[in-house]
């Protein structure tokens, strides 16, 4: 079994690593460069760094999963969510950096597309999947929570919250990649241990991110863009639902939710007080940066925190 688990990791890693020297120069020729916020002086040197590198992650996950889909059909809904949200991110990136439309997809357009993908997933889970929407309760000794019809609106909240939380986490070199590797590894351990039939895609995600990190660690030569971050959000939340573990996202994906909550709190407080701020800058990783932390320190602390939370989640089972 150990051999079977390692193979998809290695395949996805190889695909992602090989694509780097091909995709990155191509993105440079397209001039799909990142534009950094002026408030972050240390980030201004990153202006022009190619984005949309999430294509490498998506390609590695999809190609690896296709090798296994015949024997492991349960990876299909996870693959759908990963690709579905990845396409939304690609459209947003394409409009912003290729067509030079500064806003990319308008907020209502992005939300509408996210809801469409979520509806398809919800219909599959409720009508065609043999995986119930009952949720394993952490630290309960194996008890499951059944909230009946409320499970569907909770699914929508979980999907939208996780996807956008992952999106906000992508703001420093290697941050979203490193955090999500920990989460993908956790889900891989659970998938193998529970014989859930989805380990090829969870292992593929970990391998794809490891390959991408070769080019995304500080100083990054490519960013994943919304193409990658939204795809990873779709992967995380759909995997959690296929394992009946959406409540565990609050543990292993705590960084995602802190990131998105920091933005919500900042915006709400700013509007209510007429311009005052709680954080130096949101999302919260920029708050620590402006407080004197180096970019690599923020990434290290957030990644280590996620690793510890993943170990805690294993105990919570």
Image (cartoon, rainbow, N blue to C red):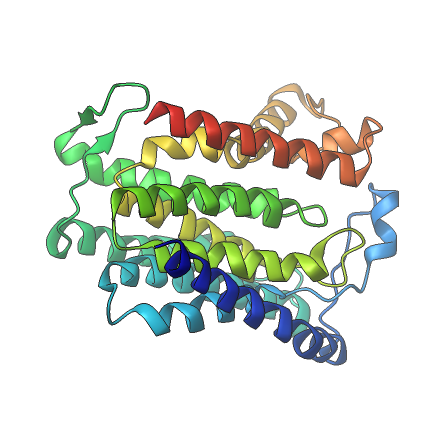
Q: What residue sits 72% from the left and 79% below the top?
A: 30
Side (left or right) of 202 relative to 217 = left
Image coords of residue 186 (percent x, y):
44, 41
Side (left or right) of 110 relative to 272 = left
From where the camera sits, is residue 103 visible?
no
Side (left or right) of 127 relative to 303 = left
Q: In the image, is residue 20 above or below residue 272?
A: below
Q: In the image, is residue 139 above or below residue 228?
A: above
- Looking at the image, which is closer to me, 106 or 54? 54
Q: In the image, is residue 145 above or below residue 80?
A: above
Of the 4 image quadrants, the one containing the C terminus is top left
Of the 4 image quadrants, the one containing the N terminus is bottom left
Quarter of the image for residue 121 reads: bottom left
Q: What residue sits 73% from the left and 30% below the top?
A: 287
Image coords of residue 88 (percent x, y):
47, 63
Image coords of residue 122 (percent x, y):
23, 50
Number of labels in the image equals 0
Image coords of residue 72 (percent x, y):
25, 63
Side (left or right) of 278 relative to 185 = right
From where the camera sits, is residue 289 visible?
yes
Q: What residue sits 59% from the left and 33% below the top?
A: 263
Q: What residue sits 34% from the left and 53% below the top?
A: 115
Quarter of the image for residue 298 reads: top right
């Amino acid at each position: 079994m150990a051999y079977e688990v390692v193979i998809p990791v290695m395949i996805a890693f190889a695909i992602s690593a090989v694509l780097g020297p091909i995709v990155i120069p191509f993105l440079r020729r397209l001039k799909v460069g990142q534009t950094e916020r002026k408030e972050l002086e240390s980030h201004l040197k990153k202006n022009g760094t190619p984005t949309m590198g999430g294509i490498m992650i998506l390609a590695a996950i999809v190609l690896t999963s296709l090798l296994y889909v015949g024997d492991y059909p349960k990876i299909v809904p996870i693959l759908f969510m990963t690709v579905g949200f990845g396409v939304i991110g690609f459209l947003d990136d394409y409009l912003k950096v290729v067509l030079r439309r500064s806003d990319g997809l308008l907020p209502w357009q992005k939300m509408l597309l996210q809801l469409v993908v979520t509806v398809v997933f919800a219909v599959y889970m409720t009508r065609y999947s043999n995986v119930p929407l009952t949720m394993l309760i952490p630290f309960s000794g194996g008890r499951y929570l059944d909230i009946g019809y409320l499970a569907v609106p909770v699914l929508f909240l979980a999907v939208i919250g996780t996807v956008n939380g992952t999106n906000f986490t992508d703001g420093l070199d290697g941050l979203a990649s490193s955090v999500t590797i920990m989460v993908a590894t956790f889900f891989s351990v659970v998938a193998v241990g529970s014989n859930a039939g989805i380990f090829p895609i969870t292992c593929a995600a970990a391998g794809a991110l490891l390959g991408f990190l070769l080019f995304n660690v500080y100083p990054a030569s490519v960013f994943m863009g919304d193409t990658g971050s939204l795809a990873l959000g779709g992967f995380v939340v759909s995997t959690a639902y296929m394992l009946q573990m959406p409540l565990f996202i609050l543990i292993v994906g705590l960084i995602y939710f802190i990131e998105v909550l920091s933005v919500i709190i900042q915006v709400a407080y700013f509007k209510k007080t007429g311009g005052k701020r709680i954080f130096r800058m949101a999302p919260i990783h920029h708050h620590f940066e402006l407080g004197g932390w180096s970019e690599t320190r923020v990434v290290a602390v957030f990644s280590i925190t996620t690793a510890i939370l993943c170990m805690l989640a294993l105990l919570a089972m």
